[in-house]
Image: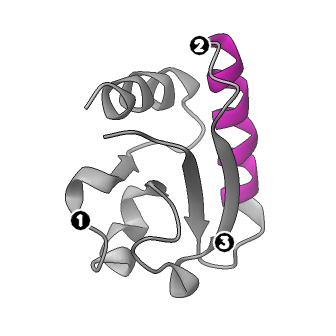
Amino acid sequence: MEVRSIMCACGSGLGSSLMVQMNIESVLKELGKSDITVGHTTTSDVTPGMADLFVVGRDLADFIKGVPEEHKVVLTNIVDKNELKEKLVAALEQ
């Protein structure tokens, strides 16, 4: 799967999704991936197709049920940058 856009989602679309967005941008920079856009939104605004990949915390995964599993990255710990990097690299290699 070619990933050109990543959307982070949380309940309010402000706090944790913005923090995860910044961490993703940092990881993408480390990986030399400058052609991927990253945004953040609320889980209620997520619709399949609005991004190639969606990143959410484990507690919110059920809120984006309409998104196919291969287009989701579900984080156990949203502040763990190592977990994020590992799962993001795996998703980008699909």
Report which residue position mark 1 lands on.
Answer: 68
Label 3 near label 1: C-beta < 8 Å? no
Task: Magenta stretch: give its range.
Answer: 17-30
Residue 41 is situated, as x and y percent measured from the top left of the image, at 66, 72
Q: The residue under label 3 is which amino acid type?
A: Thr
Question: Which of disc 1 and disc 2 is earlier in sequence?
Answer: 2
Which residue does the image show at 76% across and 63% down from the upper left?
15
Q: Is residue 57 left or right of residue 42?
A: left
Q: Quadrant of residue 88?
A: top left
Q: The C terminus appears in which quarter of the rendering?
A: top left
Secondary structure of the residue carrying tag 2 is: loop
Q: The residue under label 1 is which amino acid type?
A: Pro
Residue in front for this viewpoint, 16 or 24: 24
Residue 60 is situated, as x and y percent measured from the top left of the image, at 42, 70
Q: CA distance from mark 2 to mark 1?
A: 25 Å
> Is 22 colored magenta in this rendering?
yes
Which residue does the image show at 46% across and 41% down from the upper left?
3
Question: Which of disc 3 and disc 1 is earlier in sequence?
Answer: 3
Q: CA distance from mark 1 to mark 3?
A: 18 Å
Residue 57 is situated, as x and y percent measured from the top left of the image, at 46, 56
Report which residue position mark 2 lands on.
Answer: 31
Secondary structure of the residue carrying tag 1 is: loop
* Label 2 packing within 10 angstroms: few (<14), some (14-19), many (20+): few
